[in-house]
Amino acid sequence: MRLRLVLRLVLAFLFATFAAIFSQLIPPFLGEASFVIRVLLTLAAGGLGYMVFPPVARSVRIITMTSLNFVVHRLLSELSNQIVKIPHSSPSISGTHSQVGSVSMTRPLVLDTSAIIDGRILDIAKTGFVSNLVLVPSFVLTELQQVADSADSLKRARGRKGFETVEELKKLKSIRVEIWDKDQSNKAVDERLLNLAKNLHGRIITTDFNLNKLAVASNISVLNVNDLANAVKTISLPGESMEIKIVHLGKDRSQGVGYLADGTMVVVTDSAEKIGRTVKVEVTKNIQTPAGRMIFAKEVG
């Protein structure tokens, strides 16, 4: 409080000094009254300086902190980028305290097989929502190769599509994709993924429900593509009208089920006989389930 009072007095003195200097420009045609006017202007300027100190100080503080935060952020970002370019020795990820050089500073995103096969990570990366170092472990590529070599034609196509996804990710300028081939352990793939993410202070990108739960239990950050997809789906409020095509029966034989363009399930009461037809419905409620969002509606005329 004492320092603030001193600063307010200093600002008041500066205002008064400037007022006293510029008041000399007032013509002395009023005689002694001119002197009185100069004194009053000086005192008024001093009082003004004393009163405006708090907002001025607040503005100066905000500008200073904003500028400082911007400079620090840019310096740290540049420092991180430069350190990432420095070659680092091959670490062992079998322990929980492995030193991995600059990678730990960037909190890399570790792709698992399910996210690669799913393919939506490519579209997400193209939008710019993913901008970081992305690691594709070699054991994940091995598992992907096994899928691509499967006797099942569908699995084989999905595995090959996964390799195409990795190649397309490498072409994006907004991210840096690296193959992590420093793990030579014989543990299960999920366990190796968790160890890698933990030791690099990274986050796992997945669509695997069980891996998601295991990572959360191990205090490892997870970016689940399915959770992201559910989060950005359109929310329909009760009372809202829409048109929906009934495609099959619901659990209740009187219900009809349709789907929005984003895959959201719409359950329509008393519309089982409308399968194959497009009907106008009114939303009654929507709920969030582990499998995604569901909308319940009733048919309107």
Image: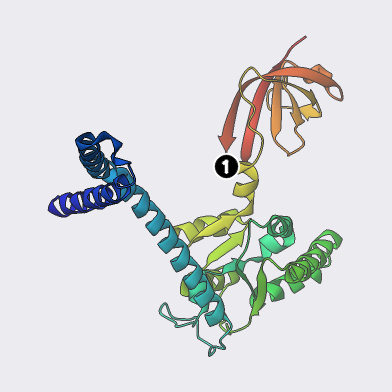
Viewer-proximal residue, 140 or 224? 224
* Extreme residue in the top direction: 301
Residue 218 visible in the current orientation: no
Left/right placement of residue 13 relative to residue 135 reads left
Image quadrant where one finds the C terminus: top right
The image position of residue 149, as x and y in percent, is 81, 72
The image position of residue 11, as x and y in percent, is 25, 51
Q: Residue at x 77, y 65 (%)?
A: 165
The image position of residue 113, as x and y in percent, is 67, 65
Q: Amino acid at mark 1?
A: Pro
Q: How is the image coloured?
A: rainbow
* Extreme residue in the left direction: 2
The image position of residue 192, as x and y in percent, is 55, 73
Q: Residue at x 23, y 44 (%)?
A: 46
Q: Quadrant of residue 185?
A: bottom right
Viewer-proximal residue, 122 or 289? 122
The image shows residue 248, relative to residue 279, as above or below, that is: below
Left/right placement of residue 297 relative to residue 28 reads right
Left/right placement of residue 168 relative to residue 194 reads right
Q: Secondary structure at mark 1?
A: loop
Left/right placement of residue 13 relative to residue 270 reads left
The image shows residue 9, relative to residue 197, as above or below, that is: above
Other residues around mark 1 within 10 Å, as few (<14) / some (14–19) / many (≥20):
few
Q: Residue at x 32, y 43 (%)?
A: 55
Viewer-proximal residue, 98 or 144? 98
Q: Residue at x 41, y 54 (%)?
A: 63
Residue 256 visible in the current orientation: yes
Return the residue at label 1.
290
The image shows residue 14, relative to residue 95, as above or below, that is: above
